[in-house]
Image (cartoon, coloured by chain):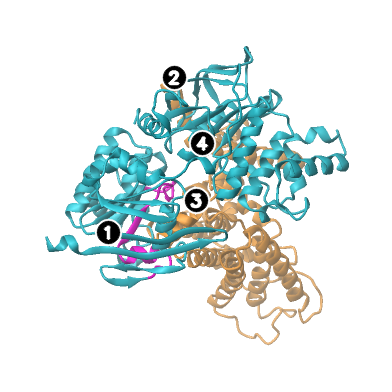
Chain colours: A cyan, B orange
Amino acid sequence: MEQQTDYLLEMIDIDKSFPGVRALDKVQFKLRAGTIHSLMGENGAGKSTLMKCLFGIYKKDGGSVFIEGEEVNFNNPKHALDYGVAMVHQELNQVLHRNVMENVWLGRLPIKKYGLVDTKKMIRDTNEIFKELEIDINPTAIIGTLSVSQRQMIEIAKAVSYDAKIVVLDEPTSSLTEKEVDHLFRITKKLTSQGVGIIYISHRIDEILTISDDITVLRDGQWIATKPAVELDNAEIIRLMVNRELTHRFPEKTNHPSGEMMTVSHLSGKYPPTFSDVTFTLRKGEILGVAGLVGSRRTELLNTIFGVFTRESGEIKLNGELVDISSPEVAKKLGFALITEERRATGLFPMMNIYFNTIIANIKEYGKFLLSQRKIAKDTKRSIDALAVKTPSPKTAIRSLSGGNQQKVIIGRWLLTNPEILLLDEPTRGIDVGAKFEIYQLIINLANEGKGIVMVSSEMPELLGICDRILVMSNGRLAGVVERGKDFGGVEGEQEHILKLAGTFI
Amino acid sequence: MERSKKVGEFLLNYALYIILGAILVTVSIIRPNFIAINNILNIMKQASTKGILALGCAGIIVLGGTDLSIGRMLGLSAAITASLVQSVTYSSRYFQGMTKQLPIIVPLLAAIGVCVVISAINGFGVSKLHMHAFIITLGTQLIAFGANCIYIESQPSGSAQALSTFEKNFLDKAAGNIMIGTLRFPKVVIYFAVLAVVMWIVWNKTKLGKNMFAVGGNQEAAAVSGVNVTKTIMYVYIMAGVLYGIASFLEAARIQSVGANTGINYELDAISACVIGGVSFSGGIGTIQGVVVGAIILQAINYSLYFLGVNPYLQYIIRGIIIVLAVAIDVRKYLVKR
């Protein structure tokens, strides 16, 4: 019993600030040996920042970290590994074209005579760990051919192979089936019985209540509570997580949805991973939210509607007329606009200036051969003024603007094409709170003008703050639709219902 | 459906070997006397030097880079080799003070040394200065070319003519044949085979090889796992330098006269051999078997077209088409549909 009071890991008064944001404010986290300690909070609450400070990916501004009583300051994840602290990332960091065992032993391949790699030992050791964890994967299989859950198991096995005392699991179940989740939990049990401490990050409250010993809740970069799981229930956790005035973070909702403008029936994507059989309608002037866990295929849905990804079956009707959206060009002509999730990868031309980034989706409007510089300047200025983009000049390279202003430029780019339907994929990701408010106001204004808006978001408060209805996706299928202000007993009831729906098909 | 899918997959996976087979079969049907051991040996012999270059270059491509400096580097290295192996009885030899033939290991080490230094500079530019391999090698190829011209121009005779008249021992060791019965088997093919085996072991059985694939496939994952990325890149470039040096040494003996233009465009053949052989320009993918077959296919195409007496300009066009085709098929293996 004495061991129960010994902490494997203590993080005390951790501070971290970014320009304009206090990301962590004297956060506490203590992990006991042989237990699972869940870390909860909304996106942006500081969970991943806290973990990045632990692993030395970010340098903490203040506070101390102790591993078994010894103060440590890790410079990088490898350094942490040497102390037996391992992380299984949500985005699995693996070399896809190589086989399982090479990925497990990468960076410390066993060597035999003449400097040759000891393949037999690798197979043996890998099999041994796999057997212990009841993982049934061939060590010589190529990683890229395996399922996400198998890859996740391999990452956990890798952590075990480092004799890790502390294992961080970041959203490990977000793309697993129920059976796979059971397997994962058996593995975590096994690890804790060997004295390993597990830090478990997840959004699934039921799951966390089942497996955790302790639960720590963060909110807006602050430590809110650490309690034994048995003292908590679903409602209490949600209260701890979202306890705040939802009103002042969002502008007043003034839009009034009217008649139907788009009907999507039985839409399925073609190439996996994808979604199937999604049916919904969008009304004029409506803000339609799309909620779901990571891997619920919300991004794929938007991309398929916009013609970026291939459609397998199903139809889309626009104002009662059947349309065949075979490519983004067609979608653009029909009045669609897509603002993508990965701003940096698929939205920005970072080295180019604001002129370029503003007009690029609408370039044919500026002349057949030589582009009209005057019209470009005029439209760019209008866009900058209308969206209140803060920039020294339209000649500034867009990468030197803040995230919020970059996003405004991209929204402005699509508004120039006069879209009727805007598909927004995580429109406020990586944007600070003040700028978020402006983006929300912008979205509501567009709805006021009668445009239809489909907004994918992982931030529950923002969906609840500005959407009229919320579609909930679960594992590639539509799990249900939440009509705001009906049947669910207010915001908290709606939130709970959405969380429940999101787990329907997993 | 399932079956046709499997056939399709089989064709994709073995496209390279099917192409090589098709070339040889087609030519033999048109000209049955093509199937002669001498023709095969000729193809192998011509494929060998460029194949050795390709073995070096392949590792750099697996890292996600490329090497434009190969040709000019070979030129400089071959010139230095040439100056050291000229016959001591030759009156306009480069080193007038040289009155006794040097042991053969000296020019070989010199050739390797030159290439290792230049290739290490390339590696440093990529790993430490974070330059794109295309740019740093574009620069070093110019430097190598200039150095080669100056070196050749500084002969005692003052002329800029090619270095020639090499000693017998060198020519025999580097470009000679082994008699197997009545068959004259080129030694260079044996060297190529040995180096290919060594490189296969390095790629598949050593830490360096595994790390090379890890860095090329996902540099981030490699770094997080504690692989020393800088060191891995440096080693791969140095290893390439050693192979380039050996190839330069052998090439000097094969052409028997080294001038300012020696080696021009060799990098294109080496890179072609790699990509035909399935080494992906996006990094992290490739096999030594593929590179060897790629080098042989490239040479088999050249030789066959020459053998059939095809118009030389048409030969370029056909070679271009085959390279594009081979790579287009190969790329399909890794295409992600969405």
Residue A249 is situated, as x and y percent measured from the top left of the image, at 53, 43
Task: Give me the C-alpha separation between circle 1 and circle 2.
Answer: 54 Å
- Mark 4 belongs to which subunit? A
Q: Circle 3 is placed at which residue position?
A: B284
Disc 1: CA contacts within 10 A as few (<14), some (14-19) or many (>=20): many
Q: Which residues are magenta?
A: A73-99
Q: How far apart are the two marked residues, 3 and 1, measured between alpha carbons?
A: 39 Å
Question: Which residue is the extreme one toward the bottom?
Answer: B97
* Circle 1 residue: A31
Q: Is residue A137 above or below residue B201?
A: above
Q: Identify which amino acid the numbered label 4 is placed on.
A: Gly
Q: Which disc is residue A465 wearing? A: 4
Q: Earlier in the sequence, mark 4 or mark 1?
A: 1
Please check whether the numbered discs 1 and 2 fall on a single chain: no
Q: Is residue A85 left or right of residue A280?
A: left
Q: Is residue A479 left or right of residue A356?
A: left
